[in-house]
Amino acid sequence: MKLYVIRHGQTDCNKEDKYTCRYDTDINETGIRQATKASNDVRKLNIDLIICSPMKRTRHTVDLINVNNIKVIYDDRLIERDGGILTKTPIDDYYFKEYYNYYSSNIVDGLETLPELFNRVHLFLNEIKTKYKDNNILLVTHGSVVRAIQFYFEKMPEDGMLLKVSGQKNCEIKEYEL
């Protein structure tokens, strides 16, 4: 079973270096161009099913990349990480020291911890591995979720600092064997 993962197109919050989190915003003109370009790559993939976060930015992205009219299922477990009070605020030093530190105990009000996020996403992956074992799947999701997916397949850095590991750009597609 192949698992393909794409992050949504760019949003204004991405462009402005703000925490987007669960702010339900759409992709911007750059994001539309990114998704339209990515549709050429998606067209060539042998995909049986698309599972997508129900947020505006992922829904718009899937509408643009799903040129082969593959069945789409929306699943809340692929929703972006809850940023609590950080939502729509400028990314600051906390982002580099705590936000992407798996072992951080300095959690701001309302922030979904990385262990909570990883648990949510990893349980989802375990389920689809069994439920759709004979299918190739494309997941359309968010930056924090793609990191959780990445560390389902890769060993996490010992210090838990996930920003040291390459992230996934808007509309970049990664492939895994599930």
Image: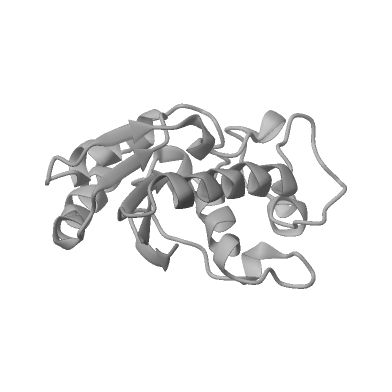
Q: Left of 23 or right of it: where is 158? A: right
Q: Position of residue 128 (x, y in %)?
A: 45, 46
Which residue is found at the position 65% from the left and 35% from the top? Answer: 83
What percent of the width, then of the height, locates residue 65? Answer: 21, 46
Along the horizontal axis of the image, is 36 left or right of 119? left
In the figure, is residue 87 to the left or right of 172? right
Return the x and y of residue 103 as percentages of the image width and height. 82, 56
- The front one of 101 and 42 is 42
Quarter location, residue 82: top right
Figure quadrant of the C terminus: bottom left
Please tell me which residue lies in front, 119 or 39: 119
Which image quarter is the N terminus in? bottom left
Q: Is residue 70 left or right of residue 3?
A: left
Work out which residue is located at the far right of the displayed protein and give it.
105
Q: x, y (%) of residue 61?
A: 28, 41
- Please name the residue shown 20% across and 60% down the image: 45
Q: Quadrant of residue 29?
A: top left
The answer to whether residue 26 of the structure is visible from this angle is: no
Q: Identify which residue, 57 or 148, lies in the foreground.
A: 148
Identify which residue is drawn at 24% across, 49% down. 48
